[in-house]
Amino acid sequence: MGDNKAVVLFSGGQDSTTCLYWAKERFDKVYAVCFSYNQKHSAEIDVARKLANQAKVDFQLLDASFISSLSKNALTDASIKMDEDNNCPNTFVPGRNLFFLSMVAVYAYEHQIKNIITGVSEADYSGYPDCRLNFIESATKTINLAMDQEFIIHTPLMNLDKSEVWALSDKLGVFDLIREETLTCYNGLIGKGCGHCPACKLRNNGLANYLTLKKGI
Ligand code: ZN
């Protein structure tokens, strides 16, 4: 199994792009796996492909469209209005990371990749259960038992808030690239986005905090 190889769960957003460059610093060979699951904004996939090419890593799109036939949510169903109240995000897709991690582990198995990297974080508001460390630890155990492997699932952003994710991208030398070319906005707008969806608010508040901190240094 390739100890020096890593695969990143990659969406072309701020978090996974930071993870991609974090991985490039640590591993000899990096792969980016992106999922299509009938996202409202297919631009996301084009952005991910372009960023992966720019980073000179292998890009693989995997079809996870079965997810949209299982559950209705605001990320895949155009008839559901995006919830702008952060208390109960209707952007939750039940089981999404469990599916994604299982699929990416099969990909890793086939390509002899030992390291799997995901940009999940439990520091931010969202409270998605499949972004928490206890889930990742449990998933690692389950996947390794299922495939008789010793995959390591890395979560470099687990305890970082958005301002600290910006700091990390700066440290990795990709602050401007991530600020201008990644897509986090639920309304499909690159860079600073629409400014009012929950993802934009989180991203832009984190950026403002980071820039304030940086000025103070
Ligand atoms: Zn937005």
Image (cartoon, rainbow, N blue to C red):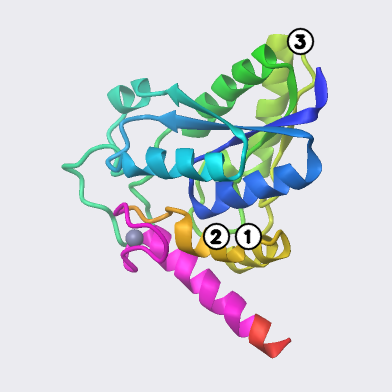
- Name which of mark 1 and mark 3 comes first in the sequence: 3
Q: Secondary structure at mark 3?
A: loop
| Residue 161 vs residue 88, the one in the foreground | 161
Relative to 12, 168 lies left or right: right
Horizontal side of 132 relative to 64 (left or right) equals right
Question: Which residue corresponds to mark 2?
Answer: 177
Tag in front: 2 or 3:
2
Q: Position of residue 68 (x, y in %)?
A: 31, 28
Name the outermost residue toward the left. Answer: 79
User: Over which residues does the magenta segment extend?
Assistant: 187-213
- The answer to whether residue 95 is visible is no
- Please identify the quarter of the rendering in which residue 4 is found: top right
Displayed-image quarter of ligand 1: bottom left
Q: Is residue 50 left or right of residue 123?
A: left
Up-down relation of residue 149 to residue 136 (above or below): above
Within 10 Å of disc 1 (Cα), the crowding (few <14, some 14-19, many 20+) is: some
Label at residue 148:
3
- The amino acid on which the numbered mark 3 sits, given as a three-letter code, is Asp
Q: CA distance from mark 2 to mark 1?
A: 5 Å
Q: Contact (CB < 8 A) between labels 2 and 1? A: yes
Of residues 16 and 133, the one drawn nearer to the viewer in this rendering: 16
Instruction: Say which residue appears at 42% left-offset and 53% top-offset.
Output: 183
- Residue sticking out furthest to the bottom: 216
Q: Pick out the residue farthest to the right.
A: 3
* Amino acid bearing label 1: Val
Residue denoted by label 1: 174
Query: What percent of the width, then of the height, locates residue 145?
Result: 73, 14
Q: Mark 2 touching mark 3, by CB under 8 A?
A: no
Q: Position of residue 154 (x, y in %)?
A: 72, 39
Q: Nearer the viewer, residue 159 or 209?
A: 209
Residue 206 covered by magenta stretch: yes
